[in-house]
Image (cartoon, helix red, strand yellow):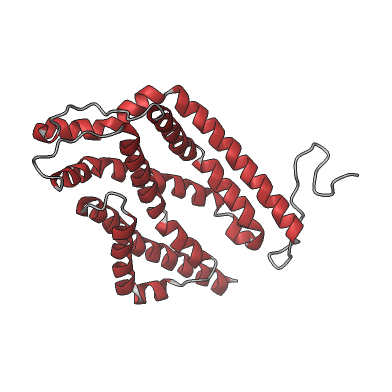
Amino acid sequence: MRNPFRRGDGEPSRPKLKSPDDTMTLVEHLAELRTRIIRSGLAVLVGVIVIMAFYDPILRFLLRPYRNLCGRRPTLCESGTDLVAIGPLSGLSTRLSIATYGGIILALPVILWQIWRFIVPALHAKEKKYAVPFIVSSVVLFAMGGFVAYWTLDKALEFLISWSGSEVTQIYPVDKYVGLIGAMIAAFGVAFLFPVLLVFLQLVGVLTPQTLLKQWRYAVVIVFALAAVITPSGDPYSMMALALPMTLFYFVSVIIGRINQKRKLAREAAG
């Protein structure tokens, strides 16, 4: 029996929606979600393979913050700049962790596109045109967040090591170190998507720039509290490096929302 949700070439097809007021059935939603998840998973798999092929230079790149710290403060690295593998599976788990984190990052444009295509039926035609800016800005902001996390890592390590005491020799398992870097990059990258969410909510009318500007004091407090909670290292350098850009992004998103609001009012007045 022919599947009504497949084209002749075998590719799943989305039911045609004439407007956002049209609805899809639960089965259609699940079929659409499955397609998006499969495509995202394939993109991540390709990214994992690419990272696996360049594992050694990527590992050296990830070790650079720790080695920079050891060069600047040699007394903190009395055991040397090499990390250790504790247990026969540590090396494998480290390689898999780096490949997974890297694969997700490389596949991020595809993942974001699939997310956008899944939610796009609920948007009007004038809102659908923001697909490319949404994806490009999200990728750029995630990359900026990852860079800030990487840039602050040696300061974070220095702070954490100082709390161990001068009588404690620092020996780091490679899997624990890589796990910290992965968590830092993920936390900063996702947090830097904060303005994209605010701008999107303003575009679809859930929030207004006036509301955001009126509540800015509460927003700043929430931003700093959130930065303190989601910063994996828990050090003040990383927390401030995360909270300050998020605060700036909050006001930038208000400005963007206000500009869009003025353009919308101008179009309505002209029409």
Q: Nearer the viewer, residue 13 or 87?
A: 87
Q: Nearer the viewer, residue 17 or 107?
A: 107
Q: Nearer the viewer, residue 225 or 129?
A: 225
Task: Tell me which residue sits at (64%, 60%) in the image.
Answer: 125
- How far across and how far down the image is residue 95, in percent? 42, 29
**132 displayed left or right of 65:** right
Task: Tell me which residue sits at (50%, 31%) in the image.
Answer: 48
**74 displayed left or right of 186:** left
Image quadrant for the C terminus? Answer: bottom right
Determine the image quadrant of residue 176. top left
Q: Is residue 44 something that shows in the picture?
A: yes
Determine the image quadrant of residue 28. bottom right
Task: Tell me which residue sits at (36%, 40%) in the image.
Answer: 179
**242 displayed left or right of 155:** right
Residue 10, compared with residue 59, is above or below; it is below
Residue 136, compared with residue 122, is above or below; it is above
Q: Is residue 17 something that shows in the picture?
A: no
Residue 103, compared with residue 156, is above or below; it is above
Furthest residue in direction front, as rendered:
87
Q: How many marks?
A: 0
Image quadrant for the N terminus? Answer: top right
- How far across and how far down the image is residue 231, in percent? 31, 53
Determine the image quadrant of residue 15. bottom right
- How far across and how far down the image is residue 25, in percent? 76, 61
- How far across and how far down the image is residue 42, in percent? 60, 36
Task: Tell me which residue sits at (88%, 44%) in the image.
Answer: 2
